[in-house]
Every structure is written in C-alpha cells, then in structure tokens.
Amino acid sequence: MMPPAEYANLASAEETFWWFRGMRQITFAAAGPLLNGHSNWKVLEAGCGTGYFAKCLEQERGWRLFPVDVSPEGLRYARALGLQRALQADIARLPFPHASFDAALCLDVLVHARPGEEAALLAELHRVLLPGGLLILRAAALNALRSRHSQFVGERQRFTRRRLSRALTQSGFRILRSTYANSLLLPVALFKFRLWEPLMRRPPATGLTPLPGWLDRILFHCLRAEARWLARGRNLPLGQSLILIAEKATS
C-alpha cells in the first residue's frame, strides 16, 4: 500500500502531469481495436487509487466502472469525484461473484505485492471476469529501474515480460498483446536511477513534483510518440513499463 501522503500527490498530478497523460494514451493505444464498440461494458478497476482514471473512462467510453482500492485515502478522492460504486476491497478477495465483469483494469498495482503473491491477485481477476473477458494489465518493468520514488510508494517488485506473461498464462489467461512502454526515455532513467540517485544518497521521495512546462511537454511528447507507434500494432522491445492485454479463456 502506498503512503497516505502519496494520494494527495496523485490527486494533484493525474490530470496534467506528463507521465499520467502519456501513459493513458499508451495504454489504450496498446489495447487498440479490442476496446471499440463496447460502450455498455461493466468494468472493474482493481487498484483505482484516487479514481481519476475510472472517472475518465466513465465519461469518455460510457463504461460502468466499479473502482476498488484497499486504501481509504484513495477512496475519499474517488467518491469526491462522484464515483458512487467506489469500494474498499483487497484485490486478493474481491467482493464480487464469479463472472461479473466484461473487462478489468489493473494498472501499476502488482508491483505492491510481494514476489509470488501476484499469482493470487491474477487468479482473483480471472475469477470475476466473464469468459472471454478482457484484462488490461500494466506494471513497472526491470529491477534495474528501481528508484527513490519506487521505494517511497512501497514498490516490492518489478517484472520482465517473460515473467509477467508466464504468471498470466498460469492463471488461465490467453495473452493477446504484450509490449514494453516508456522506452524512449530508458537511457535517461538508467542514468538517473542507477548513477545520479545513488550518488546523491537522498532518502525515498515522491517523483510527482511539478516540472517546468517546457520539460513536461518534452517528456509527454516522447510518450505520445510511443502511443502512435503502438497504435500501428508494433511493440517495443524494452522499457520502463509493461502492458499486457489478455482474455479469460472461454474453455
């Protein structure tokens, strides 16, 4: 679970901060046509944080969102946004019947589970999806990219594409697409997280601090370029994040 203070940082940053804007574009570019024509979907967001993304999905796609989070701090923000179905729940024990949802999103949540515990979370997501239901999964990639921010938010693990794909398959999912993302900025991240931060020896801290406008725009344009690449059906071989789209097998 993230420290309570980070929810305030999220609430102030999610609408405009370059990473959130860019990763929203990337996530749906990766999912692509699989999401088209489904305006009446019933959708679970497992680990909704402040609920901002769930609110966007309700407004932009017309989905019926059921946002859940284990943190009461995040849910206070979600309910303030008008998300009446926001519910406090542990993803490992979801309070929904079998085969309840057309789709589920789980974005940057598995990293908070201890290594090995992700299997139980994926099994529970599989349980509540309808046969053929879609899972959109995003997770931080590569242990070499752990940072002060990673430590501050309680990140316990990162994934490779092979390891995360294997976990999904073992939980009964069929993988439709698997790609890294946030790739263009990988050299910058390696320099910052492996050289600069160890040299500075500063304590863990949030990475959601405001940037000069020109820098925010440059970083966002890097992610937007990747979204356009992914929208053409092309994958990225390495990056700071992983995005996997999978479906619950029908038999």
Image (spheres, rainbow, N blue to C red):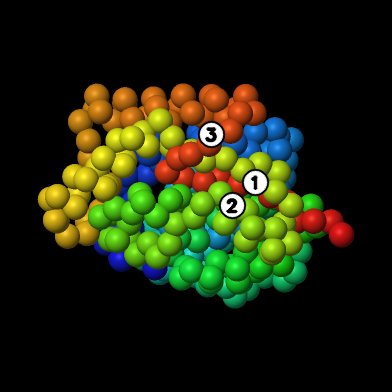
- In this rendering, the answer to whether 31 lies above or below 150 is above
Q: Position of residue 168 (x, y in %)?
A: 65, 58
Check the picture and name the quadrant holding the C terminus: bottom right
Q: Rate crowding at label 3 as few (under 14), some (14 to 19) or many (20 or more) other CA atoms within 10 Å.
A: some
Depth check, front residue: 48 or 242:
242
Q: Total marks drawn? A: 3
The residue where tag 1 is placed is: 245
Q: Earlier in the sequence, mark 2 or mark 1?
A: 2
* Residue at horizontal 29 percent and vertical 53 percent from the top: 147
- Give the amino acid type for the residue marked by disc 3 in the picture: Leu
- In this rendering, the answer to whether 192 lies above or below 137 is above
* Residue at horizontal 37 percent and vertical 37 percent from the top: 186
The residue where tag 2 is placed is: 162
Q: Position of residue 171 (x, y in %)?
A: 69, 64
The residue where tag 3 is placed is: 236
Callout 2 secondary element: helix
* Residue 204 as seen in the image, left or right of residue 201: right
